[in-house]
Image (spheres, rainbow, N blue to C red):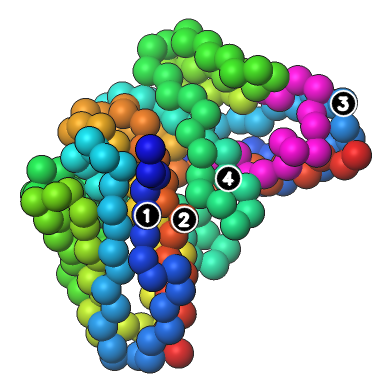
Amino acid sequence: EAGVTQSPTHLIKTRGQQATLRCSPISGHTSVYWYQQALGLGLQFLLWYDEGEERNRGNFPPRFSGRQFPNYSSELNVNALELEDSALYLCASSLARVRGETQYFGPGTRLLVL
Amino acid sequence: ILNVEQSPQSLHVQEGDSTNFTCSFPSSNFYALHWYRWETAKSPEALFVMTLNGDEKKKGRISATLNTKEGYSYLYIKGSQPEDSATYLCASHNNDMRFGAGTRLTVKP
């Protein structure tokens, strides 16, 4: 069974540009989570999607947004990129909209903003 | 405690040593505590999820306990091996999922 996949693996952008990161969950999983790990920091919760709807978001500005498609894959969009957006972005999926369900992580997208 | 805190930040042990790490988490609106193992250049791998006070889970040489009343969890590794070298993350699911900064374990042969 395929795990969570993310694309691209690496992304280089300049300040002010927009970045789009993609995630495909494990087959059968309906919830998708996005996390940011900036250099020297722990994983910070960004967004949670389930059944196509945003269920919760972390303490990030509105220029971080996303969506979930009918096939449960998801996109994370970061507008007006800033240097401090450089980070590893991890996507995770879980079986259902149930707190406590194990989240399975993808390999991440490393974003570098110059 | 408002955030998830892990200690120590890093740990260096010899092969064969047993070791343990601590995770402190908010006890209000608590639902579940997760432990993950994260090797360099790989995805975090789920180890355990615990929900009830007093829960104990075991997977091979690794075990974990949970105290929801005081808001802490311990992860134990018995007879550490070099392949156990990784960052061990805990995450508390309260109103949202919060991760600790991790404990980086290095096991020397």
Q: Is residue A67 visible?
A: yes
Which of the two marks, 2 or 4, is nearer to us in this view? 2
Specify the quadrant of the image occupied by residue A29.
top left
Marks 4 and 3: same chain? yes
Rendered location of residue A51, percent (x, y)? 10, 43
Q: Chain of mark 2?
A: A
Q: Which mark is residue A61?
A: none
User: Quick one: SS at disc 4?
Assistant: strand
Residue of label 3? B16
Secondary structure of residue under mark 1? strand
Labels 3 & 2 near each other (Cβ < 8 A): no
- Establish if A8 lies above or below A112: above
* Residue A47, above or below B4: below
- Distance from label 3 to label 1 (Cα)? 35 Å
The answer to which of B71 and A3 lies nearer the viewer is A3
Q: Residues within 10 Å of mark 2 (few under 14, many from 20)?
A: many
Q: Which residue is mark 2?
A: A107
- Residue located beneath label 4 in the image: B38
Q: Are marks 2 and 1 in contact (CB under 8 Å)?
A: yes
Q: Residue B14: image x %, image y %?
A: 89, 35
Residue found 23% across the figure and 79% down from its top: A79
Residue A62, x across and y down, in percent: 18, 69
Residue B48 % position (x, y): 49, 25
Question: Do badges 3 and 2 share one subunit?
Answer: no
Instruction: Name the one closer to the observer, A49 or B104.
Output: A49
- Residue at horizontal 36%, vertical 66%? A7
Dot 2: element:
loop
Residue lying at the far top in this picture: please name it.
B54
Which amino acid, mark 4? Trp
Q: Which residue is mark 1?
A: A5
